[in-house]
């Protein structure tokens, strides 16, 4: 069941499946449940805010200041989180934000927030910001943001109720939110690790000193007193207010480098490490860490102290912001080089370069839709966390699609298909009398796959990356008119359920490794997105689903199966069932760890 990808299958199979109905539509009672005033479905946690941008909200360029926007974003998101939690919530973190458009005075900002998923005491809130020109009726996307809020009750730990996703988009976000949370919680360590391993050349010595601005000249220190309007009714400082103050000092530092009016383009993911209250003095410090040709990184650090204990400072937050300076044609202008201070300054200078590389790598892998990620993504330490994320989230997105159609059924195995503009996918499903955790162990070790899948002739474990990710070299026999056997280098990423109702996931995608390059002996095959989802249906009962996307290299083989002209898919999947049943008691002791 390895799939080969080369070109895209068009909608040629539409007529075969068009008479079948969708498997995952919203049940009628639920649909009526969520109708609001006859307007159709609306997410129960959704909150909207619309603001007219007035001169008092703008910066020196006459555009909405990002600090003000961050306050509105944080308030809208917080109200959505509190709507779900039913109690006060605080901002724990904000993922990277890329600002696509500036907003002018007189325009309207529309902010929409909804809870994508609730975990234990925390929730991921998705926020969309658009701007609207009232005269021309034009609308622009300004940015998307993802924030984590934590619910607080005075005396007890909060256990939030689950979010039940209804629409395809909600199901996708719900599935991927668990994967994003995983990445968020290791973010600080990942970045620290990457910075330690990222060999960035220090090119300061080779630059023309006469065109350099000493970093010291951009240093800013500013104090703020937290007053009641800056806090919620429990006296906790609003995260948005702190972000706005951070943006303010960062903009001053950036202006001191460029001697102009900089525009904030991106904010790196950050975490509010500890709370702040009314009466706190906040000290905000900023400096330009590095200037690249057309952009600069400004770092900001926030500490809090009480008047009575000035020497006892609490670290509240650190953030890294990227600014550009736009010329009259809105194109970024060239910036002067920065001369870092010896010691700490030089370290931050190097780390800013490393962060830039990491940011670009990550942006590329994480933001690419599954159809756009090139197949042969090289595996290396700087992208492994993001490739693993991409691997699992691509499969979860495929699983959450609404338009799967039951195509055929044989021996209690169901075959579903999905036709999209560029891709054709299928999945097979059966219920097996085996414990889900046991099936997960058996299926996630690809070395055992040749025991049931004749398409896997030989499997070598190349690298056990961590407990949940491994890279395998797979050899597959020649199929469907091929002259040579195929080989694949596959990243297998496995995930246990995040909460009840979540499946066990085993996601598979191709990567390239310098140690396993293509050889004349084999035809190199690639798989873009495939894998297993295992749902616990009861004690010793598991729904096993195998998903696979895009098949062009083996199109004939797959369509022959899908059209019912061959039963090889069924035979293989039945062999999988026998393998699971034969080995269902094998690894019983290790189940305790799952
Ligand atoms: N990003 C997202 N969520 C995070 C996180 C991060 N960097 N760090 C912790 N969390 C989540 C945890 O996953 C956990 O979620 P769960 O209950 O759903 O599993 C939740 O926060 C609590 O984690 P816990 O380990 O119990 O607490 P902690 O000591 O890590 O504290 C905060 C986490 C967010 C509560 C704490 O850092 C805090 O109070 N920060 C200040 C929040 C605030 O006041 N913000 C407003 C501006 S100051
Ligand atoms: P790091 O020094 O590892 O970057 P910190 O949390 O100490 O992490 O600081 C975050 C950023 O805040 C720094 O990169 C720097 O840009 C800025 N910063 C920290 N301390 C100062 C300071 N004393 N003056 C000006 N800016 C500072």
Image: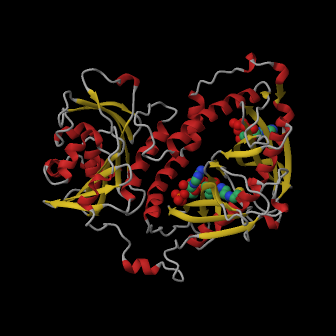
Rendered image quadrant of residue 341: top right
Q: Position of residue 502 (x, y in %)?
A: 38, 59
Q: Is residue 583 left or right of residue 339?
A: left
Q: Position of residue 433 (x, y in %)?
A: 19, 59
Q: Is residue 78 visible?
A: yes
* 182 and 3: which is toward the camera: 3
Drawn side of residue 173 relative to residue 233, left or right: left
Query: Could you tell me which residue is drawn at 48 percent across and 67 percent down?
Result: 163
Q: Please give left or right for residue 376 compared with residue 352 in the image.
A: left
189 to 438, vertically: above or below:
above
Instruction: Name the foreground residue: 446 vs 371.
Output: 371
Residue 450: image quadrant is top left
Q: Is residue 542 visible?
A: no
Q: Position of residue 184 (x, y in %)?
A: 55, 48
Query: Percent position (x, y) of residue 530?
Result: 33, 46
Q: Is residue 469 above or below residue 576?
A: above
Residue 256 drawn above or below residue 17: above
Residue at figure coordinates x 64%, y 21% from the top left: 201
User: Which of the two residues, 430 or 104, is positioned nearer the viewer here?
Assistant: 104
Q: Quadrant of residue 525?
A: top left
Q: Residue furthest top?
A: 206
Number of callouts in the render? 0
Asked whether 1 or 442 is in front, the reply is 1
Which residue is most to the front? Answer: 136
């Amino acid at each position: 069941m390895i799939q080969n990808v080369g070109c895209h299958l068009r909608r040629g199979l539409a007529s075969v499946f068009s008479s079948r109905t969708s498997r995952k539509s919203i049940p009628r009672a639920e649909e009526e449940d969520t109708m609001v005033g006859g307007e159709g479905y609306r997410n129960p946690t959704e909150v909207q805010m619309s603001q007219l941008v007035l001169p008092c909200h703008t910066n020196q360029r006459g555009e909405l200041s990002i600090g003000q926007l961050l306050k509105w974003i944080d308030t809208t998101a917080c109200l959505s989180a509190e709507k779900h939690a039913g109690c006060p919530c605080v901002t724990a973190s904000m993922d990277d934000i890329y600002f696509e458009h500036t907003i002018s005075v007189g325009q309207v900002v529309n902010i929409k927030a909804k809870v994508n998923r609730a975990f234990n005491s925390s929730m991921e809130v998705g926020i969309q910001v658009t701007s609207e020109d009232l005269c021309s009726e034009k609308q622009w996307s300004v940015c998307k943001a993802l924030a984590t809020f934590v619910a607080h009750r005075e005396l007890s730990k909060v256990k939030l109720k689950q979010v039940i996703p209804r629409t395809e988009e909600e199901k996708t976000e719900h599935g991927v939110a668990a994967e994003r949370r995983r990445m968020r919680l290791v973010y600080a360590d990942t970045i620290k690790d990457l910075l330690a391993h990222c060999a960035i050349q220090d090119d300061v010595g080779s630059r023309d000193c006469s065109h350099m601005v000493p970093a010291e000249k951009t240093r800013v220190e500013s104090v703020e007193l937290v007053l009641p309007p800056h806090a919620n009714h429990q006296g906790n400082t609003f995260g948005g207010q702190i972000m706005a103050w951070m943006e303010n000092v960062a903009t001053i530092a950036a202006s001191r480098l460029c001697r102009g009016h900089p525009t904030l383009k991106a904010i790196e993911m950050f975490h509010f490490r500890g709370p702040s209250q009314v009466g706190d003095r906040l000290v905000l410090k900023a400096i330009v860490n590095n200037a690249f040709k057309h952009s600069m990184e400004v770092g900001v650090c926030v500490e809090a102290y009480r008047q009575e204990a000035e020497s006892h400072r609490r670290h509240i937050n650190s953030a890294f912001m990227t600014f550009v300076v736009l010329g009259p044609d809105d194109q970024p202008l060239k910036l002067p080089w920065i001369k870092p201070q010896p010691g700490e300054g030089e370290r931050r200078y190097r780390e800013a370069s490393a962060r830039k590389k990491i940011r670009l790598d990550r942006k590329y892998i994480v933001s690419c839709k599954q159809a756009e990620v090139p197949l042969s993504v090289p595996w290396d330490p700087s992208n492994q966390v993001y490739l693993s994320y991409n691997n699992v989230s691509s499969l979860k997105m495929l699983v959450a699609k609404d338009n799967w159609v039951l195509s055929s059924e044989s021996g209690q195995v169901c075959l579903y298909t999905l036709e999209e503009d560029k891709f054709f996918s299928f999945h097979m499903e059966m219920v097996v009398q085996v414990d889900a955790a046991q099936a997960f162990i058996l299926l996630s070790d690809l070395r055992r796959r040749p025991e049931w899948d004749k398409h896997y002739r030989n499997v070598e474990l190349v690298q056990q990356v961590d407990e949940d990710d491994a890279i395998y070299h797979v050899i597959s026999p020649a199929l469907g008119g091929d002259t040579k056997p195929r080989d694949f280098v596959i990243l297998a990423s496995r995930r246990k359920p995040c909460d009840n109702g979540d499946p066990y996931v085993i996601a598979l995608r191709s990567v390239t490794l310098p140690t396993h390059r293509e050889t004349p002996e084999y035809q190199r095959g690639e798989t873009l997105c495939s894998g297993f989802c295992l749902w616990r249906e009861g004690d010793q009962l598991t729904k096993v689903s195998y998903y696979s996307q895009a098949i062009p290299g083996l199109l004939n083989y797959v369509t022959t199966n899908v059209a019912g002209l061959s039963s090889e898919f069924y035979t293989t999947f039945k062999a999988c069932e026998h393998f699971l049943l034969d080995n269902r008691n094998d690894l019983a002791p290790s189940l305790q760890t799952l």
